[in-house]
Amino acid sequence: MASVLEFGVVRVHLGDKSGKYPDGNQLIVQGADTRVAFDTPEVANRIGPELDTVDLVILGHVHEDHMAGLHRLPHARVQVHEADLAAAQSWDGMCRHYGYPPDVLDAMRAIVEKDFHYHPRPDATGYSDGAVWDLGGGVRVRAHHLPGHTAGHCALVVESEGLAFIGDIDLSSFGPYYGDATSSLSDFRQTLKKVAELDARIWATSHHKAVITDRAQFLADLARFASKIDERSTQLLGYLQAPQSLDELVDRRLLYPAGYDVPFVPCAERNTIAMHLDELLSLGQIQTLEDGRFVAV
């Protein structure tokens, strides 16, 4: 696959291994009046004047890997959905976004500053669902709020090209990630229905898949991606054939393999498992024992 793909006014710069984390895929949209970047992943640091001359960065959501090139663009305006805005503006906002304990946040700050060139943007401003940017020459971008991964996660649709940048609805084999303080399993379930309804014929992801141009393939990939949620619930139910505490479940892991010991992993496991437990309790598939442990019904 070429390192740069072109779809009319949209250029997609592919990150390493089609944008596999910690890299990502960089979209640049050229209107008659305005040049816009969707996010700024690590690959942004390998792009020359085409990136340096962007007028506006629209963040589809805020995480460290989507801000890795912002340090190069102090002149550009930055906009992000209002629910993620504080996370873009300051480290304190990012800490609330992650929701990790102080020792984990300290370790994460060292990582994001060293590996992702993290610089907050206190000048960033917010947009809301349905926001439209007219870039000139008939090029229009519309935001569609699709929360779950983060509270402010959005798809950015270049309507003139029928191209939807769907961010971290990345169609990977890992499946949906909803392990942070502003993440939501229930919202992600709804988002996975809504993203299929976007008026698009081209779908671009931040990671892994990069670009899909066949709707049947997109829907098949989306179904496989979404199925990971129920697979996780089934895995938990298997664990809960015998009583387990939340701490015991975190130790057994639901998301990451043993040996993958990045500082945030236990927090992500805990947040994710807790959401699944709440869902399974509401469905009557598990119960809480007097000692606080959980067991399948």
Image: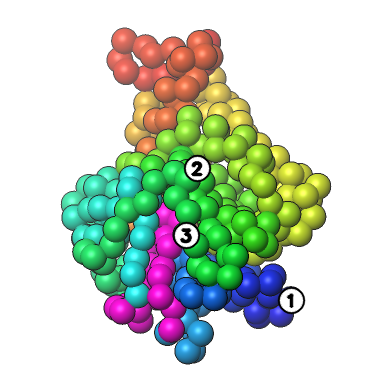
- Whether label 3 touches label 2, CB < 8 Å: no
The residue shown at (42%, 84%) is 52
Foreground residue among 231 and 10 = 10
Q: Tell me the SS state at disc 2.
A: loop
Percent x, y of residue 92: 19, 55
Foreground residue among 37 and 43 = 37
Q: Is residue 89 above or below residue 286?
A: below
Foreground residue among 14 and 162 = 162
The residue carrying mark 3 is: 133
The residue carrying mark 2 is: 146
The residue shown at (67%, 62%) is 161
Percent x, y of residue 157: 58, 55
- Residue 219 can be seen in this image: yes
Percent x, y of residue 84: 33, 50
- Residue 64 included in the magenta stretch of the image: yes
Distance from the alpha carbon under mark 2 to that under mark 1: 29 Å
Q: Is residue 23 above or below residue 223?
A: below
In the image, taking residue 216 as reference, residue 158 lies left or right, namely left
Amino acid type of the residue tagged 1 in the rendering: Met
Residue 1's disc is: 1
Span shown in magenta:
53-75
Q: Tell me the SS state at disc 3.
A: strand
Q: Nearer the viewer, mark 3 or mark 2?
A: 3
Q: What count of labels does the image hold?
A: 3
Question: Which residue occupies the extreme bottom position in the image?
Answer: 49
Quadrant where the N terminus sits is bottom right
Distance from the alpha carbon under mark 3 to that under mark 2: 18 Å
Question: Which residue occupies the extreme front position in the image?
Answer: 137
Way the structure is coloured? rainbow
Q: Is residue 46 above or below residue 253?
A: below
Which is nearer the N-term, disc 3 or disc 1? 1
Amino acid type of the residue tagged 2 in the rendering: Leu
